[in-house]
Image: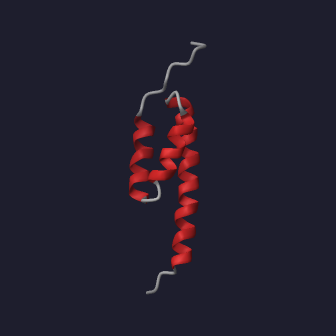
Amino acid sequence: MNINATLYGEFIILFALTMGALCYYLGRRKTQSPVWVGGFGALLSLIPPLGLVYLLALVFKKDVASAAD
């Protein structure tokens, strides 16, 4: 079975963008710097298992108390 490099590259880029958006969304609630969290999540998702582990770490992290509380 042949794997097309272009298709694999498109999958990796789409996966990185999706993971970056999900990490940013979670980072808004769980950290003080969501942009860095989203960028780091997108960078780690270039190797998909690392991106998924990072996303799971964000999911299980406690929420940051907001200033309104």
Residue 54: image x %, image y %?
41, 45
**From what the image shows, is residue 4 above or below residue 9?**
below
Give 56 or 24, whichever is nearer the viewer: 24
Residue 31: image x %, image y %?
50, 29
Residue at the location (41% across, 36% down)?
60
Residue at the location (48% across, 26% down)?
63
The residue at the far bottom in this view is: 1
Quarter location, residue 14: bottom right
Quarter location, residue 22: top right
Residue at the location (45% across, 45% down)?
55
**From what the image shows, is residue 37 above or below residue 67?**
below
Give 12 or 26, whichever is nearer the viewer: 12
Q: How many marks?
A: 0
Residue 41: image x %, image y %?
48, 47
Its colouring scheme is: secondary structure
Quadrant, the C terminus: top right
Quadrant, the N terminus: bottom left
The residue at the far top in this view is: 69
Residue at the location (41% across, 44% down)?
56
Residue 39: image x %, image y %?
53, 45
**From what the image shows, is residue 63 above or below residue 46?**
above
